[in-house]
Amino acid sequence: MAKDIENPCVSTCQLSGDLCVSCGRSKDEIRKWKRMKRPEKMAAVQRATQRLKALKKAK
């Protein structure tokens, strides 16, 4: 069986609107994480990474 996708949570939740600026996931992604299948988790992590990069560029 393939290795599970590690949760990107860094245990420092800082929500700004619908987005956690610590891990980059949306509220919806955070809420659904445990029920997501591997491909969904991979996509969520990729989106979160892109959001965090965009946030860093905006600073």
Image (cartoon, helix red, strand yellow):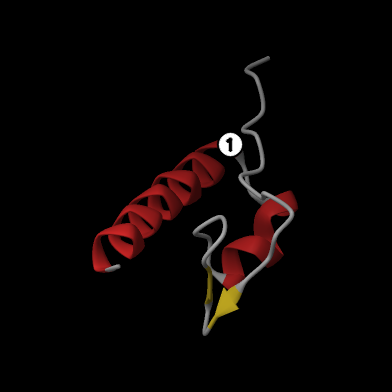
Residue position for label 1 = 38
Residue at the spot 40% in from the left edge and 56% down from the top edge: 52
SS category of the residue bearing label 1 = helix
Q: Position of residue 33 (x, y in %)?
A: 67, 54
At 59% from the left edge and 70% from the top edge, which residue is drawn?
A: 28
* x and y, in percent, of residue 7 in the image: 66, 42
User: Which residue is situated farthest in the left direction here?
Assistant: 57
Nearer the observer, 22 or 4: 22
Where's residue 4, x and y in %? 67, 28
* Residue at position x 34%, y 64% in the image: 55
What kind of residue is marked 1? Arg
Q: For the image shown, how many numbered marks are present on the structure?
A: 1
Where is residue 54? Give x, y as percent.
29, 60
In the rendered image, which quarter contains the C terminus? bottom left
- 13 sits left or right of 43 in the view: right
Q: Nearer the viewer, residue 50 or 39?
A: 50
On the picture, is 25 further left or further right than 48? right
